[in-house]
Image: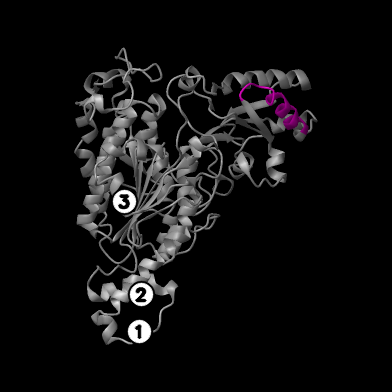
Amino acid sequence: MRALFGVAVLFLLGTTAFKQQHVPLATEEDYPALVRKTLEEEGLIKKRSSQPKLVVGIVIDQFRPDYLSRFADQFSEGGFKRLMKEGFYNRNTHYNYVPTYTGPGHASVYTGTTPAVHGIVGNSWYNRVMEESEYCAEDTSVSAVGSNSAYGNISAENLLTTTISDELELATRREAKVVGVAIKDRGAAFPAGHLADGAYWFDKKYGKFITSTYYRTELPAWVEAFNERRLPQQYMDSTWNTFLPLSEYEGSDDTPYEEVFKGKETATFPYDLSVLGGQNGNYNLFTYTPFANSVVTELAKAAVEGENMGADAVTDLLALSYSSTDILGHSFGPRSVEVQDMYLRLDRDIADLLNYLDETVGKGEYLVFLTADHAAAEVAQSLIDQKAPAGYFDQNSLAEEVEAFLQEVYGVAGLMEYATNLQFYLNHDLIYTSKLDLQDVQQTLAEFLRRKAGVAAVYTASQMQTEGYTEGITQKLQKGYYYKRSGDVLMVLDPAWIDFANYGTTHGSGYNYDAHVPLIWYGWGVEEGVSFKRQHITDIAPTLSFMLDISLPNGATGEPILELLEE
């Protein structure tokens, strides 16, 4: 690369700019910036703006890196291929905590830190004060805007740190436009942050996009107009068939490892949505289809136009999350024709979005980063049938065993209060009033759980609070632990063991199949290239902070990706 810069500089010595100006002797490290500056002045390349007009963050839910290679021959030139060929691909990017779920994933991408700091320890957790499960984006102090359903009790209130989107708003004195869009509410709310101009998600009851009073008191006219197009219903009046001839897809369309929708005898194409919608919940079924991604793409374009994003010198931010890849992936698994078809269609949606941004914002004037909130495991039953190590774990059944065990050991009923995220919550008040030692109860339960099939390791909250783990899954577990919301005893399962049905798949572990995700940068300030250096998902927000020259999110623990920043 440096040799190339040297050749470029020798060439430029003969150009008009170098003949007419006294240019100081450049060191080798100065070549890239000097070459760019001179080429800009010569008019040989377009002068780059000092800041991007628009940042577009794309998070694809349950996106595995191997999809980019497995489906490459069937991708268009303008979608994923364009991003990989013209952008910078960090191929060795990982989540550095457990659990790898949607809520924590989106929060970590935009805060630049882990659940131990930002507090989103799962899609839900047990609230000891309320004595019930609490959804990660739940906010009962706000209400829906755009419908009267419970889907509107949503905000970023539970997120304990600022996001890169918050910092952009602060840096521009709220002049920046920040908007989040997704099917899932948590996929819109956490990326948009606390100070956003709007966050919009899908109301499965009414089939339209809504927000909450946390963001606005009424829907903007452009969202109202978008809802009036009734795109979800138009798709539900159609049939989902394969994008390409079925013979061009991997494997069989008829396997025992996929969920069968009500009204069908097999999990096979075609899917007559107009018929199946009545038995599977019309707009609920819509979220399983690739058409939901297409609608979100249209909503993103409507947001750019409606909010006049990327139209002035103040950088705006559009946070876009594609949720249906996860919704479908859970039911069909990563080797299904359905998932492959969804990604072929998503590729075209991304191409459409990039073309739109080229026309409206200007090619080279916007910055894109594309990543995932987590990846996904293989279908465990499929691995078992092929004699590969895997297994199934039943947390709910084990919770009943735990309660019986603790009652037998301590003679007190009700010591086990709740189980979720492979964590057990003990009844602290009961332990204290029964004059028991909390650490002793934790350790006793941990020893009991370590003997269970599929359990690789068990740790107590006391260990998470007092020990300093520096490597492996244990360190990831600690980075995902926040004592006010996490459990008393935390389990790690063996690789390829999942707590799920015997069809489809899930995620949540710290193993590579869940933690390794794509990360691609494209557009403003990005030179094409590839890196195999290990990066963490928490490095995205700090990198953006330095690219935009704004403050780091206040809890950020990640490091900037120097390969993107150094010229």
Q: Which residue is mark 3?
A: 85
Residue at 71%, 24% (x, y): give it: 448
Q: Tell me the residue that label 2 is attached to.
A: 34
Foreground residue, 272 or 26?
A: 26
Q: Does residue 48 lie above or below 179 as drawn? A: below
Q: Please, which residue is most extreme toward the right here?
A: 435
CA gap between label 1 and label 2 equals 10 Å
The stretch of residues the image draws in magenta is 440-454
User: Would you place residue 248 above or below residue 89 in this image?
Assistant: above
The amino acid type found where label 2 is placed reads Leu
Q: Are marks 1 and 2 in contact (CB under 8 Å)?
A: yes
Is residue 224 in view?
A: yes
Mark 1, secondary structure of its residue: loop
Please state which amino acid type lies under the numbered disc 3: Lys
What secondary structure is found at the residue carrying circle 3?
helix
Residue 46, placed above or below residue 316 = below
Query: Depth check: 415 or 467 in front?
Result: 467
Residue drawn at x 46%, y 49% as measured from the top left: 109
Percent of width and height locating residue 315:
34, 62
- Magenta segment: does it hold 197? no
Question: Mark 2 vs mark 3: which is more N-terminal?
Answer: 2
Residue 446, magenta (yes or no): yes
Q: Return the x and y of residue 375 as percentages of the image width and height.
A: 45, 37
Q: Which residue is disc 1 drawn over?
A: 23
Q: Characterize the local packing of mark 1: few (<14), some (14-19) or many (20 or more) Cα atoms within 10 angstroms.
A: few
